């Protein structure tokens, strides 16, 4: 799956220290290979998944939106390689969901 890194995601990674950047890169590679292993969200964040990982005893979350499972399964059957996974946000749990909802709302405008 081709990754698209949204603005909040890129900003966090850019400001993070190099060791955390490398861990985030590894975790996003894992998510790209297994996009439905994350925790599926419901309600306002329906269609989004969250992948959790730890770095220096701090838990971080990666919020992303893969293509619907039906589309992904069909694409695999036909060997289509244009599927996109959007990485929206990465950070600690505190305020992550609120900021993600705010960004989605702004993106729709």
Image (cartoon, rainbow, N blue to C red):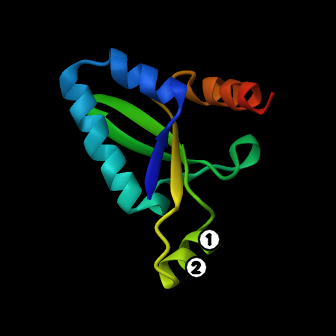
Check the image and name the residue furthest to the right. 109
Q: Position of residue 89 (x, y in %)?
A: 51, 32
Count residues near mark 2 (Cα–Cα under 10 Å), then give few for <14, some for 14-19, many for 20+: few
Check the image and name the residue furthest to the top. 15
For label 2, the SS is helix
Vertical placement of residue 75 versus 22, above or below: below
For label 1, the SS is helix
Instruction: Name the side, left or right, on which 34 lies relative to 63.
Output: left
Q: Residue drawn 75% across and 41% down? A: 44
Q: Quadrant of the N terminus?
A: bottom left
Query: How far separated are the C-alphas under marks 2 and 1?
Result: 5 Å
Vertical placement of residue 70 versus 38, above or below: below
Instruction: Name the side, left or right, on which 68 lies relative to 107.
Output: left
| Residue 105: image tag | none
| Among the 4 quarters of the image, the one containing residue 73 | bottom right
What residue is pinned by disc 2?
Answer: 74
Q: Residue drawn 33% across and 41% down? A: 53
Marks 2/1 in contact by CB < 8 Å: the verdict is yes
Check the image and name the residue furthest to the bottom. 77
What residue is pinned by disc 1?
Answer: 71
Near-viewer residue (23 or 60): 23
Q: Residue drawn 47% across and 29% down? A: 9
| Among the 4 quarters of the image, the one containing residue 34 | bottom left
Q: Quadrant of the C terminus?
A: top right
């Amino acid at each position: 799956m081709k990754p698209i890194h949204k603005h909040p995601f890129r900003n966090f990674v850019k400001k993070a220290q190099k060791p955390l950047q490398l861990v985030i890169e590894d975790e996003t590679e894992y998510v790209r290979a297994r996009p439905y292993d994350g925790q599926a969200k419901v309600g306002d964040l329906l269609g989004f998944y969250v992948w959790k990982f730890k770095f220096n005893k701090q838990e971080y979350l990666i919020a992303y939106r893969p293509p619907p499972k039906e589309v992904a399964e069909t694409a695999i059957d036909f060997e289509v390689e244009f599927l996109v996974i959007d990485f929206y946000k990465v950070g600690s749990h505190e305020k992550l969901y609120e900021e993600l909802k705010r960004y989605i709302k702004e993106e729709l405008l």
